[in-house]
Image (cartoon, rainbow, N blue to C red):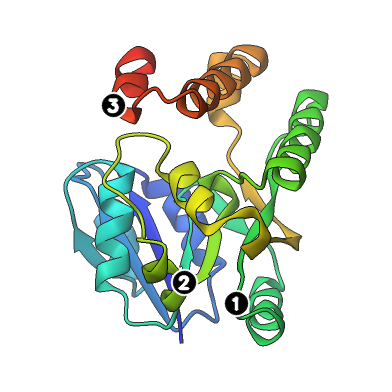
């Protein structure tokens, strides 16, 4: 049984697109962090189960996983959209590599050349360092999720924290893209946003606490 877990906060329009592509999932859980828009209505309309949790992606992911009933978990961001055939790709991974976790190939929904460059950089990071971010999704068996301790209630870097415990040798990148909204890069600037993300990862790797990083980059 596959449970899809989506943390959300005021993500109505993005969530609607995300949920529209999740046909085939046995269970969909939207963990709401206190939305004031139509996020909950969108989730209920799509027949997703809504779980309330304190605001914060780490806490929300943790709560969603605890509420899920599936023996496989797929964690997905609300502004990420899976392509056709995702369920078959997931099923093939489960059948062939049940001991491993998996992520999707990073893709941005923008035609700019900066988006293609960033996609290649992310693919390289995953291959070399084994560090996908949450916007690539994370498919993991409940057994492995619990064995490594699951998501921690971190304000930032909760995705990197978990995949580092999973380990590079137990992580595969699927040959299928998860298209993420490029709105943050368009809003903040391609270079500025990418530099900010890299700085967060660098500081975390150097041992700076997620709480301090969150305060610095707020």
**Dot 2 crowding, Cα within 10 Å, few <14, some 14–19, many 20+:** some
| Element at label 1 | loop
Residue behind mark 2: 144
Whether residue 176 sits left or right of residue 86 in the image: it is right
Whether residue 95 sits left or right of residue 101 in the image: it is right
Give the residue drawn at x 58%, y 39%. 181
Rounded to the nearest angstrom, the CA distance separating label 3 from label 1 is: 32 Å
From this viewpoint, is residue 41 visible? no
Residue 99 tag number: 1
Mark 2 and 1 residues: CB-CB less than 8 Å, in contact?
yes
Where residue 40 sits: x, y (%)?
25, 57
Q: Quadrant of residue 6?
A: bottom left
**Dot 1 crowding, Cα within 10 Å, few <14, some 14–19, many 20+:** some
Q: Is residue 196 above or below residue 134?
A: above
In terms of sequence position, does the residue under pointer 2 or pointer 1 come before the other? Answer: 1
- Foreground residue, 170 or 85? 170
Whether residue 183 sits left or right of residue 35 in the image: it is right
| Element at label 2 | helix
In terms of sequence position, does the residue under pointer 3 or pointer 2 come before the other? Answer: 2
Residue behind mark 3: 211
- Foreground residue, 119 or 155? 155
Give the residue drawn at x 55%, y 66%. 139
Q: Specify the quadrant that holds the C terminus.
A: top left
Residue 210 tag number: none
Give the residue drawn at x 61%, y 14%. 189
From this viewpoint, is residue 4 visible? yes
Rounded to the nearest angstrom, the CA distance separating label 2 from label 1 is: 8 Å
């Amino acid at each position: 049984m596959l449970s899809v877990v989506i943390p959300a906060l005021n993500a109505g329009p993005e969530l609607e697109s995300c949920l529209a592509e999740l046909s085939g999932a046995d269970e969909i859980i939207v963990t709401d962090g206190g939305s004031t828009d139509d996020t909950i209505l969108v989730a209920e309309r799509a027949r997703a189960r809504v779980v309330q949790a304190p605001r914060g992606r780490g806490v929300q992911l943790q709560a969603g996983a605890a509420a899920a009933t599936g023996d496989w978990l797929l964690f997905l961001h609300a502004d990420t959209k899976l392509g056709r055939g995702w369920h078959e790709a997931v099923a093939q991974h489960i059948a062939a590599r049940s001991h491993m976790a998996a992520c999707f190939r990073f893709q941005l929904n923008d035609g700019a050349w900066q988006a293609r460059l960033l996609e290649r950089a992310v693919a390289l990071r995953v291959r070399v360092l084994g560090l996908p971010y949450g916007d690539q999704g994370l498919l993991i068996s409940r057994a492995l999720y619990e064995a490594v301790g699951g998501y921690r209630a971190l304000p930032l870097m909760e995705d990197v924290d978990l995949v580092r415990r999973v380990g590079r040798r137990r992580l595969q990148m699927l040959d299928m893209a998860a298209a993420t909204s490029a709105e943050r890069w368009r809003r903040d600037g391609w270079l500025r946003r990418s530099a900010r993300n890299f700085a967060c990862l660098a500081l975390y790797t150097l041992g700076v606490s997620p709480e301090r990083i969150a305060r610095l980059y707020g």
